[in-house]
Image (tube, grey):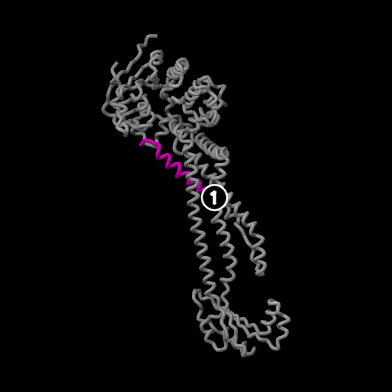
Amino acid sequence: MSAQAERRTAPPAKKGAEPRGPRAPVGERLAAWRDQHFFSFFSSLGRLAARPWATLLTVLVLGFAIALPLLFWVVFDNARELSGGLREAREITLFLKPALDARHADAFAAELRRRDDVAAVLLRTPEQGLAEFRDLSGFGEALDALQSNPLPSVLVVTPRDSGASEDPPLVAAMQADTRVDLVQYDAAWRRKLGGILHFGERVVAVVAVLLALATLLVIGNTVRMDIQARSAEISVMQMIGASNGFVRRPFLYAGLWYGLLGAVFALLVVVVVEVALAEPVARLVESYANRFALHGLDPGVAAAVAAASALLGWCGAWIATARHLAAGRPA
Amino acid sequence: MIRFDNVSKRYLTGLDALAEVSFEIEAGEMAFVTGHSGAGKSTLLKLVSLAERPTRGYVTVNQRELARVRRRGIPQHRRGIGMVFQDHRLLTDRSVFDNVALPLLIAGTSRTETAKRVRAALDKVGLLAREKASPLALSTGEQQRVGIARAIVAKPPLIIADEPTGNLDPQLSLEIMNLFAEFGAVGTTVLIASHDLLLLKRMHKRVLVLDHGRLVDDYRPVRAA
């Protein structure tokens, strides 16, 4: 028999009615698609459970990577709240010359109240000041020994908020006033505190971004090794007609699980740290007679962290599988 | 079912695996491809399953010109082909049943339909009783039969097999080949690469002979019976 079959110059170009593999109705295909997802969802978890130590190690690495920015965040969130009261305190405290008597102090206060840039003025007489000092300092008996009250009258002036960041002109005016002995205004210090907090927030954001990237890479690399270990299986699946989506799916779910478990572990770390620090912080705060209480992550933030981490895992796995799939196909 | 029009394949290494090969296999026909090692048998099958693309010429499978099948269409194309490998390539981490069910899972067949078809396929290869076993617990011949069940479970119009009896003794080889012949008898096109000439002689089927990438003989048995 001849080796040459009949030849044709052009290939038959049949378009449209292309015979394809067996296809089921839409409803059934949808159910099957759902089945495939269910299958991948749980079988990927089963695979992780089949190698508990390797999985645990990955989850621990991820957990610490996620916990670090979370802890920073908790610290700064608390610091911000603690400083919130301070930053809003804009009062200017005027210590008047001791020579000024109560009547003149009263007149001075009235004069200030008439100014446009003053919202309120509180006058504290030397007597009030002494009583307050006696209460707070514990030097009551020593004070009783004093012949006369050494304290000056004090005016606490609340300037009208101009929105400007620099010192109000009122401060300079008061420093120049002859009736005033000392002007206490902590705006500069407060601005520094604000700057530090702003810097801290930025550090938290940068660290969070870097560690999110690390999470992506750790999961991507773990999934990549997983893919290598199962490359024979993948090639069989591809040979018998598995689409990229089908091959990719279990790995995507594995990435999702890694991200989720890592986040859960990270939240656990944060809770443990909070519990460990709660007692000393409470004692510290108490010594400052402050109503401040340490607060941790609220459930909304925790859920967002878990979701973001799972999403990162999914993306990391996607990158890893995309690289593998791109390498293994003819044009 | 399969037509090669003047097909040549040169690998990137410069090796000419196939040179100007033309032939046609009718639907429902059973044919063998034979030749020495490196004659191009595997390459020929790879062109059919789109594991490789030809350098020149046209390959048509099931009336579809394969040059028209884009990357995205390759999985769909392969679902129309039942593939059997020399080393059977079963997945050892799952049961015989799950291995055979894999093409149906991929195709998105419903669970009840899958169970029915998997059992039917296993019944055909005589391994219905072993559905829960691991492939590792089976003999080589049984493993290859599971591989065949996997190839036929989705009822593809075409089955291709690359040295399916390469690891089997003559008796088992003949059993496996007769199994293939049964599918041929019910209208499935079967194309098998094999270098076992004695076995091919006993089968009395069409044989394409390759030599250094060229089709040197196309033997058709005289229909006596």
Left or right, B49 with respect to B175, comes to left
**SS for dot 1:** helix
Residue lying at 55% horizontally and 89% vertically, measured from the top left: A178
Q: Quadrant of residue A75?
A: bottom right
The answer to whether residue B182 is seen in the rendering is no
Q: Main secondary structure of the magenta part?
A: helix
In the picture shown, does residue A32 fall above or below B38?
Answer: below
Q: Which of A157 and A209 is in front in this view?
A: A209
Residue B56: x and y in percent read 29, 31
Which quadrant: the N terminus of chain A? top left
The answer to whether residue B176 is seen in the rendering is yes
Residue B40: x and y in percent read 34, 25
Residue lying at 52% horizontally and 59% vertically, measured from the top left: A204
Instruction: Kindly give the residue lying farthest to the top in the view shown.
Output: B225
In the picture shown, does residue A43 fall above or below B120?
Answer: below
Q: Which of B98 and A74 is in front in this view?
A: A74
Residue A137: x and y in percent read 68, 77
Residue A154: x and y in percent read 62, 83
Left or right, A148 with respect to B208, comes to right
In the picture shown, does residue A199 fall above or below B116?
Answer: below
Q: Quadrant of residue A328?
A: top left
Which quadrant: the C terminus of chain A? top left
Q: Does the magenta stretch include residue A35?
A: no
- The subunit carrying tag 1 is A
Which residue was labeled with disc 1? A307
Q: Nearer the viewer, residue A242 or B175?
A: B175
Left or right, A18 with respect to B117, comes to left
Left or right, B155 with respect to A124, comes to left
Amino acid type, label 1: Ala
Q: What stretch is highlighted in magenta?
A: A306-331
Q: Does the magenta stretch include residue A328?
A: yes
Crowd tier of the residue under label 1, counting other residues whose Cα lies within 10 Å: few below 14, some 14–19, many 20 or above? some
